[in-house]
Image (cartoon, rainbow, N blue to C red):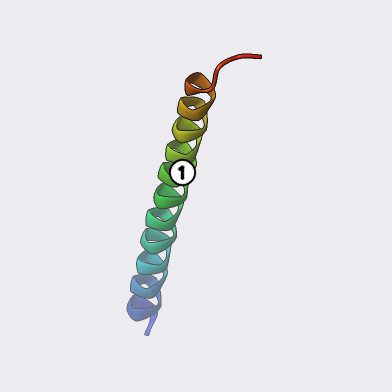
Amino acid sequence: MEMRFKQALSAKSAKSQGFLKVVLKQRLLSRAMLSQTKNEEPTK
């Protein structure tokens, strides 16, 4: 019983870590896209 619970917990934490990594990647990508568009736009 305890082993199963621990396995579930570790799987959950691994999943959440993967999710966080994805979120961070998306944030970095969106930031890069924003900076690109800013650089492309002529400064007024």
Type of the residue with mark 1: Leu
Q: Where does residue 2 sit, x and y in percent of width and height?
A: 39, 79
- Pick out the residue farthest to the right: 44
Name above or below for residue 40 compared with residue 13. above
- Pick out the residue farthest to the top: 43
Which residue occupies the foreground of this view, 23 or 18? 23
Name above or below for residue 19 compared with residue 36. below
Q: Where does residue 33 sit, x and y in percent of width and height?
A: 45, 34
Where residue 42 sits, quadrant-wise, is top right
Which residue occupies the foreground of this view, 4 or 41? 41
Where residue 29 sits, quadrant-wise, is top left
Q: Mark 1 points at which residue?
A: 24
Instruction: Characterize the local packing of mark 1: few (<14), some (14-19) or many (20 or more) Cα atoms within 10 angstroms.
Output: few
Q: Residue at x 49, y 29 (%)?
A: 37
Which residue occupies the foreground of this view, 42 or 6? 42
Q: Residue at x 37, y 55 (%)?
A: 18
- Pick out the residue farthest to the bottom: 1
Q: Residue at x 53, y 22 (%)?
A: 41
Secondary structure category for the residue under label 1: helix
Where residue 7 sits, quadrant-wise, is bottom left
Numbered circles on residues, count: 1
Please identify the quadrant where the C terminus is shown. top right
Which residue occupies the foreground of this view, 10 or 17? 17
Q: Where does residue 17 sit, x and y in percent of width and height?
A: 41, 54
Q: Is residue 22 left or right of residue 38?
A: left
Q: Which residue is drawn at 45% across and 36% down?
A: 28
